[in-house]
Amino acid sequence: MQRTLRIGTRESQLAVWQATQVQQLLQQNGYTAELVYIKSEGDIDLQTPLYAMGVQGVFTRSLDIALLSNKIDIAVHSMKDVPTQLPEGIVQSAVLKRASYKDLLVHKGDFDAKISDPQSQIIIATSSIRRKAQWLHRYPNHTIENLRGNVNTRLQKVADSSWTGAIFAAAGLERINLRPENSFELDWMLPAPAQGAIMVVCRNNDKESWEACRNFNDEDTALCVKIERDFLKTLMGGCSTPISALAQIENGKVVFKGNIVATDGSAKVEVERQATVDNAADLGVSAAEEILKNGAAEIVSKMKAN
């Protein structure tokens, strides 16, 4: 008799939405599955900036522990939150087709007028050190405030605050139909590695769960996010770093863009490379090695020192 697969998920609306998509995909392939709700450290501590919490996988570790202790069979993660090195005993079983990779700004109105007025005090909220660094590189005179909580909580905080705006992942808002009209995509901002992708993991000795999830693994997305995460891992390895990467398949080629920005926005080093799909497996590593030679090593060294 086939067992019911237990899907571990955080309790936020977005996390539950993601886990429900996996549940439905499993059901479409003849499996039965149920959701198991688990709190993460990132959900409990809503005050400390993510980059100051001192742990990798702040949103994934509790689910990993539940997986390894056999309380769940599958865990569903926003892939940009997953450390580049999975815990021993856990393997990637599927990556879902990617949604929007873009960041967007939710603002209070008249943003263009405010940003063009040199007398206007611009305050932008985000918990992401990557978004902070890129914003300050473009707008060095603006102020950045910390913003924590799930998507719903953060949107309410923006509405209740005196901030000019706040930065969100487009996919997170769009998946649960919460993208406000007063928002626009930041086309100039390069995303976090694997932003917009959903990763499903299981225990490495659980062949049934692994095979069940392989039915809906999207190979193109899996290749692109692997390249992005290889770039991150080769440069520094952590999720809470000002490192951005995007790989896209265009006409049989993988086009890659990556950068690293000093945390205060004072310096940025970029790289662009491409390769055929068949020869793209090492694209993230080679791009990282190139950018390290061109000035990224100095930025990484300063971050490690701090």
Image (cartoon, rainbow, N blue to C red):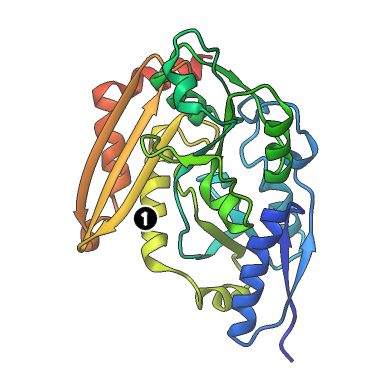
Give left or right: position of 187 versus 270.
right
Q: Residue at x 67, y 62 (%)?
A: 17
Q: In the depicted view, which residue is nearer to us: 166 or 195?
A: 166
Residue type at mark 1: give it.
Cys
Q: Residue at x 36, y 17 (%)?
A: 267
Q: Position of residue 57 (x, y in %)?
A: 63, 42
Observer able to see residue 111: yes
The residue at which mark 1 appears reads as 224
Q: Position of residue 58 (x, y in %)?
A: 67, 40
Snapshot quadrant of residue 5: bottom right
Secondary element at tag 1: helix
Observer able to see residue 208: no
Up-down relation of residue 120 to residue 206 (above or below): above
Give left or right: position of 286 versus 207.
left
Q: Residue at x 20, y 53 (%)?
A: 275
Q: Residues within 10 Å of mark 1 (few under 14, many from 20)?
A: many
Q: Name the residue at the bottom extreme.
A: 1
Which quarter of the figure is the N terminus placed in?
Answer: bottom right
